[in-house]
């Protein structure tokens, strides 16, 4: 899988002008995201593929790399210059890379889990 990239490699791609796309849900993106990333959820990504330029380098990411890996594989097979952040935003944070907001957290993808997590954080747990 030649499109898998470490957080250090993704940081270099971003510095070189790569487009950064978060394929997670809206609440996951709000909880924490890579700076200057845009959110195009996996569920709508293929309907919006016309918005991607085959000549532009694109990095997909998600929570741990599974959803973005599916997107990277499909778009790579279609001739796009795409990469996947291996390990997702969770690995990015573990590697000490910056996120927005600075006190953000990696949210669970399910809506119910996200609600429970938000309540626990608000209660200080």
Image (tube, helix red, strand yellow):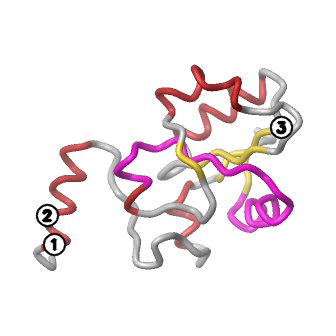
Front one among 35 and 69: 35
Is residue 94 in the magenta section? no
Q: CA distance from mark 2 to mark 3?
A: 40 Å
Whether tag 2 and tag 1 are in contact, CB under 8 A, the answer is: yes
Q: Secondary structure at mark 3?
A: loop
Instruction: Write the residue at 32% across / 52% down.
Output: 108
Q: Tell me the residue that label 2 is attached to.
A: 119
Name which quarter of the figure residue 52 lies in.
top right
Front one among 81 and 55: 55
Is 78 placed left or right of 112 in the picture?
A: right
Q: From the top left corner, tell me how far across and down residue 112 is, in percent.
A: 18, 45
Q: Residues within 10 Å of mark 2 (few under 14, many from 20)?
A: few
Q: Tell me the residue that label 3 is attached to.
A: 81
Q: Residues within 10 Å of mark 1 (few under 14, many from 20)?
A: few
Is 73 placed left or right of 38 in the picture?
A: right
Front one among 49 and 81: 49
Q: Quadrant of the N terminus?
A: top right
Instruction: Write the residue at 21% across / 50% down.
Output: 113
The span shown in magenta is 6-29
Q: Quadrant of the C terminus?
A: bottom left
Q: Earlier in the sequence, mark 3 or mark 1?
A: 3
Q: From the top left corner, tell me how far across and down residue 33 is, in percent.
A: 51, 61
Q: CA distance from mark 2 to mark 1?
A: 5 Å
């Amino acid at each position: 899988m030649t499109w898998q990239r470490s957080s250090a490699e993704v940081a270099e791609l971003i510095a070189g002008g790569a487009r950064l796309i978060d394929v997670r849900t809206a609440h996951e993106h709000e909880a924490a995201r890579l700076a200057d990333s845009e959110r195009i959820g996996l569920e709508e990504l293929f309907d919006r593929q016309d918005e991607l330029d085959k000549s532009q380098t694109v990095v997909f990411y998600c929570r741990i790399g599974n959803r973005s890996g599916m997107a990277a594989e499909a778009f790579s097979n279609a001739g796009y210059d795409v990469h996947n952040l291996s390990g997702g935003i969770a690995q990015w944070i573990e590697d000490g890379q910056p996120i927005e907001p600075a006190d953000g957290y990696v949210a669970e993808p399910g809506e119910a889990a996200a609600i429970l997590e938000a309540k626990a954080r608000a209660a200080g747990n």
